[in-house]
Amino acid sequence: MPRKRGNLNKIRLKKPDDLRKFVVKVINDLNEGTITESKAKTYGYLGNCLTKIFETVELAARVEQLEEALNQSNK
């Protein structure tokens, strides 16, 4: 039997706005009682980790651009 790839309920958080929408959903789900406080805290913690990753990736890209511009001006 072929193995199924992926999950239709998979959460895709590829950019900061995706994370913002997810956090709003978690808040609403918690308020409605469809998720536990423990699960909301876990999502909050992981969301914070992802925020730091987004920031680090953005800063690394900006540093790389500055280094390239500096190297071009030194030629």
Image (cartoon, rainbow, N blue to C red):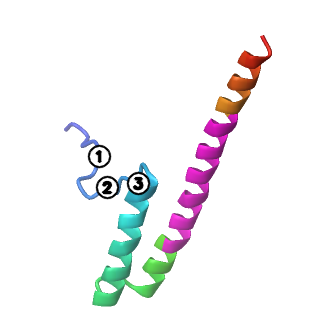
What is the residue that sits farthest to the left in this orientation? 1
Whether residue 69 sits left or right of residue 42 in the image: it is: right
Q: Give coordinates of residue 24: x percent, y percent.
A: 36, 74
Q: Residues within 10 Å of mark 3 (few under 14, many from 20)?
A: some
Three-letter code for the amino acid on which mark 1 is drawn: Gly
Residue 36 at what x, y percent from top left?
Answer: 39, 85
Secondary structure category for the residue under label 2: loop
Q: Which mark is residue 56?
A: none
Nearest to the eye among marks 3 and 2: give it. 3
Q: Is residue 61 magenta?
A: yes
Q: Which residue is mark 2?
A: 10
Residue for point 64% across, 38% down = 62
* Front label number (1 vs 2): 2
Please name whichever residue, 62 or 7, is drawn nearer the observer in this view of the structure: 62
Check if mark 1's residue and mark 2's residue have beta carbons within 8 Å: yes
Q: Which mark's residue is nearer the viewer, 3 or 1?
A: 3
Is 6 located above or below residue 35 in the figure?
above
Q: Residue furthest top?
A: 75
> Are the residues at dot 3 and dot 1 in contact (C-beta closer than 8 Å)?
no
Q: Tell me if mark 2 has few (under 14), some (14-19) or many (20+) residues whose alpha carbon lies within 10 angstroms of its own.
A: few
Can you tell which mark lies on residue 13? Answer: 3
